[in-house]
Amino acid sequence: MSYELIAILMFASMMVLLMTGQRVFAAIGFVAAGAALLLYGQGAVEMPFSAAFKLFNWFPMLTLPLFIYMGYILAESGIAEDLYRMLHVWFGRVRGGLAIGTIFLMVIISAMNGLSVAGMAIGATIALPEMLRRGYDKVLISGVVQGGSSLGILVPPSVVMVLYGMIARQPVSQLWLAGVMPGLLMAAMFVVYVLIRCRLNPELAPVVSDEELEMPLREKLALLRAGIIPFLIFFTMTGLFVMGITSLVESSAVGATSATIAAALKGRLSWNLVTETARKTLGISCMFLWLILAALAFGAIFDGLGAVRAIESLFITRWELTPWQIIIMMQVSFIIMGMFLDDTAMLVIVAPLYVPLVKILEFDLVWFGVLYTMTCQIAYITPPFGYNLFLMRAMAPKEIGLTDIYRSIWPFVVMMALTIALVMIFPQLALWLPQHVRGI
């Protein structure tokens, strides 16, 4: 049996196991372990240990639990809810102001957590009921929450980019900086879209009544102080890192410590809060570690079989595709897989194939990491099986049905696709900041 056929069988076996509903890390790890034993005999038992130590020796991995902890403690302590109340008061007089404030909220939550699930949870449980109660169109606000929450995997500190940096051997600091401008550009498109829609059809977003917004200036300022805490945490964490005062890991520790202090100053730090946050942090962190461990083992076997060279020969020599056609094919494959898998599963499945090929084609791997992350955002909210669609349905108020959710996302898919096209045409949108900050 040729190595090419073995590689195809490995990939097909993994996909079959995934379709049976097995856990992603179990399916990938089982195929990797089975192929290793069949190909290399008993000596292959050392491969998982080698992959594990390679993973544990990667210092930036320490940022993963710290950033997840920071996001959860801000959400569980109610600080994120205070932020939404501030946005409600200060944006209430603008047509569509609550929807615009929710987009800003999603960006901030993304910057605090790095996971789209956190933004989705806060948006669906806090923002959606408030906007529905004030007469906002349910299709419009459903799209706002879904589109805004997807920014969590692009705006730093993105956990997905940490994983991509691990697998692609790229500096996480460069990946984070590369995601800033595309993320802000996408958020700006969302805001402009809401403003235009609400101006053309004022019934979509009624202005908040004067009675609700009439409060003494002292109360408004107090509410502003409550909402400023997340901003201070984020800018302290990223500012120290950008100025070179702290390393990546130290910045994550600053963020986690600042979030804990903020919860304590508000009188919301309790033993139950700490234990619940620690439990959720441990669960998410362990899931990511198992996924990466399985991916490293699978990638070692796959690369040893020459699968990357076989795909290179197929795309370039036999099909005579241009480098840009290959990149576009990769993006399309991400969208298709994203209908069935989450971003982490996609990454560990295709990274052993795509990352070496991108390097052979002489594209920048940091730039490609941003493209991958942005395409995952589209995959998250694309029917029929987009990851965020079902999360939204599970957490949204009962007034919002699955049909409303499906209808709401298409304008945001178009804006995300436009942003991807701009980054592909103008790579400096992603690469300018990492090239100029700290001399990177």
Image: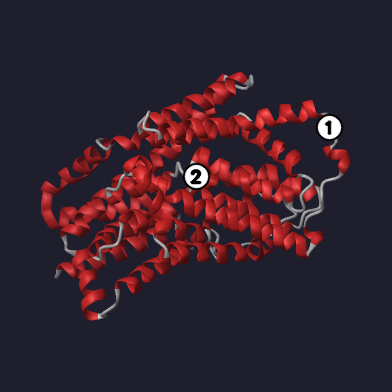
- Above-or-below relation of 334 to 144: below
Tell which of 268 and 83 is nearer to you. Answer: 83
Which mark, residue 250?
none
Residue extending furthest right? 211
Tell which of 425 and 81 is nearer to you. Answer: 425
Q: Secondary structure at mark 1?
A: loop
For the residue carrying disc 2, how many other residues have a C-alpha within 10 Å: few (<14), some (14-19), or many (20+)? many
Q: Quadrant location of residue 27?
A: bottom left
Q: Nearer the viewer, mark 2 or mark 1?
A: 1
Q: Amino acid at mark 1?
A: Met
* Residue 23 shows in this picture: no
Q: Residue 374, how many percent across, how many down?
A: 46, 57
Residue shown at 34%/37% (left/top)?
Answer: 61
Residue shown at 66%/36% (left/top)?
Answer: 83
Q: Quadrant location of residue 50?
A: top left
**Which tag, 2 or 1, sits closer to the chain's start?**
2
- Above-or-below relation of 327 to 389: below
Q: Residue 396, how many percent across, how many down?
A: 67, 50
Marker count (numbered):
2
Image position of 354 (left or right of 203): left
Which mark, residue 215?
1
Q: Quadrant of the C terminus?
A: top left
* Residue 321 shows in this picture: yes
- Which residue in the structure is indicated by mark 2? 115
Tell which of 430 and 408 is nearer to you. Answer: 430
Q: Residue 390, how many percent across, how many down?
A: 58, 55
Q: Amino acid at mark 2?
A: Leu
Image position of 215 (left or right of 41): right
Q: Residue 146, how many percent across, how many down?
A: 60, 54
Residue shown at 26%/80% (left/top)?
Answer: 319
For the residue carrying disc 1, how many other residues have a C-alpha within 10 Å: few (<14), some (14-19), or many (20+)? few
